Amino acid sequence: MALSDEQLAQSRNITVEQVQQLRRSRGTTNETLATLSEGAVHRALRRLNYPDLPNARRAYRLKQERGDDGAIPVHARGRAIDRLRSVLRNRAVAPGPLTAGVPTGQAPGPRAQGPSPTAGMALTHWEWLGPGNIGGRTRGIVIHPEQPEKMWAASVGGGVWHSQDAGKQWAPVDDFLGNLACSSLAMDPSDPDTIYAGTGEGFSNLDALRGNGLFRTTDGVTWKPIAATQTEDFQAVTRIAVSRTGEVVLVATDHGLFRSEDRARQTWTKVLDVPLGIVLFDPGDDGRAVAGALEAGAAFASQDSGRTWKIAGHGTGRWSGRVELAYATKDPAVVYASVQMTSGRIWRSTDGGRTYEVTGTRAPDGRIADYLGDQGWYGNAVWAGDPDDENLVLLGGVNLWRSEDGGETLAEISTWSDPRSVHADHHAIVAHPDYGENNNRTVYFGNDGGVFMAADLKKVGLEPKPPFVKGWTELDNNYGVTQFYGGAGQTATGRIIGGAQDNGTICFDPDRGTEDWRQIFGGDGGWCAADPGDSNVFYGSTSS
C-alpha cells in the first residue's frame, strides 16, 4: 500500500505541503523520503528556500566577463597567458624548490620560453593520496565494442580516464591534456581507437569550468586538440555524435550545433543556432539524427545527416527547459524525450523524432513521477538500449527509475541516500557492448559520484520498499576526479580533510591509504580548517 502524503507528514512532523514540495524537488517517492534521516529532511527543507536559478547564474557570469564596452573579449584568456609568458621571458627569478610548501620547480630565466605545461609538476615532487574510492562528476562513458574491458570516462574536473579491466582500476589518459573539464565522449563506430572528448560544461552549474574545444585520439592513447574547435563556440561542449561511417561529426554546444565532414576536422559549420544539450545519430541510419535543447524546451530532427533541421512537434503540450533524448535500439523509429518541465515528463516518438506524444509518467501510486526533481537542467539522462524491448526505458535524475511500458509507469530503482546504492545526480547511461547476448544485462552509469554498474539491470530495484541497494557496484577504483572546494591538513598526523562537490566533507588518513577516504558528513562540502593546537579537531562547511 502506498504511503500517503498525510501519513508521511505525520510521521516526520512536517506539513502535507512540505511533503509534496520535497517529493518534487528531490525527484523521489514518499517511500524513499520515509527512509531519510531527520537531519537529511531538515537540510532538504532548508534548501526549498534557496532554489537553483541556473539561468540567472549564467547571466551573472556573462556580466562578469563583459568589458567596459559591454562586449565579451574574444580569446581574453589566451592573450593573458601570452602576456604572462612575455613577462616571464624578460625577467629572472631566483629558483626555489617550494612555494608555501608546494613544489614549484626552478623559475624560468631571461631566455626561457615561458612556462611549460608541466612547470612545477615533476613527478618526483608529488605523491598520489586519492581519494581512490570517492569519484566525481562524470558526464561521459564509452566502451570498446570488441574489447569491452577497455573503458573511458569523462570527468568534468579531472579529464579523461581509462580502464583496461572494466573499471577495476583507472588511470588518467593525460594529466596535461590542455583542458581537464571533459564533459562528453564519443567513439567512432567505424574505428574504436578514435575517440573524441568535448570540454567545458554548458549546464549552468556553479562549479562548471570553461572548456577549450575538442580533443581526439586515434590510437586510444595519445590525445591532441582539434585546433579548429579552440574557439568561443566550443567552450562548452555538451555532446558529440559520430556517424556509423565515421565521416560526419556533430557537436552540441551552448552556442548551437556544429557539423564537420572532413576527416581532419578542420572545417566546422553551424547548422542550428540553438543552445543544445544532446545530439544523436540514428543507430541504424546515418541520414537521420535528433537533437535536444539545453533550455528552450524543444527537440529537432534531421533527415540529411545533420545538414538541416526541423523542430519536432509535440501536440498541444507545452515543453520547457532541457530536453534529453534516446533512440530505442530495437526500433530506432521510437525516440524518448525526457523533458525538464517542472520535475520531469516523458514523451515518446514513433516516427524517428519528428513528432512526440506524452506518456503517463506515473509512479506506482498513480501520481506523476517527479523523477528529475528540481534539477532537470543539471542531471537528466534517458536510455532505451535494450535490443529486444523498445519499451524498456531508464531515466536518471536524482535517483534512477525504470519503465517497462514505454514511459507510462515508472519505478524507482536506486536510493542515493544509502551508500550501498548508487550516487545521486545522473548524467550518462551506457550499456555493455554485449548487452542482450548470453544473458548479459550490464549497464554503466556516470553521476556525481563517478562510475557505477548494474551487473544485471533486471535484478536492481526489486526490494519491496526503499532503500534499493542490491545489485549495484561502485567502480571508483583509483578514479581520482573528485572536485574539491577546500581542504586542510594536520602536519603532525598527516590526516587531511576536504570539502568536495556532492561528495561531502571527506577525510584521508595515512594509516588507511588512498582507497579508504571516509565521509564525515554529506552534501556539498566547502571550506575546511585544521586546529593547529589539537590534531583531532577539524572544521568543515556544507552548502546543502
Image (spheres, rainbow, N blue to C red):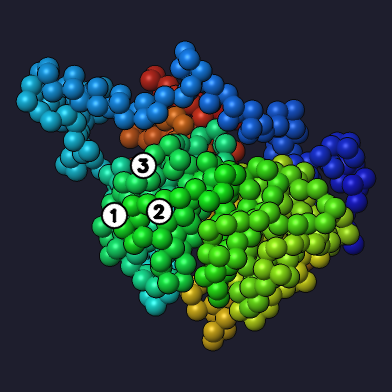
Q: Residues within 10 Å of mark 1 (few under 14, many from 20)?
A: many
Q: Position of residue 266 (x, y in %)?
A: 33, 52
User: Which amino acid does the dot numbered 3 rest on?
Assistant: Gln
19 over 115 or under it: above or below: below
Q: Earlier in the sequence, mark 2 or mark 1?
A: 2
Q: Position of residue 320 (x, y in %)?
A: 74, 44
Answer whether labels 2 and 1 touch (C-beta < 8 Å).
Answer: yes
Which residue appears at 80% of the width and 48% of the height?
Answer: 318
Residue 230: assigned label: 3
Give the camera-side residue of 460 and 264. 264
Q: Earlier in the sequence, mark 2 or mark 3?
A: 2
Mark 2 or 3: in front is 3
Please give left or right for residue 107 compared with residue 400 in the image.
left
Residue 197: assigned label: 2
How far is disc 2 from disc 1 in space, using C-alphas? 9 Å
Which residue appears at 24% of the width and 27% of the height?
Answer: 82
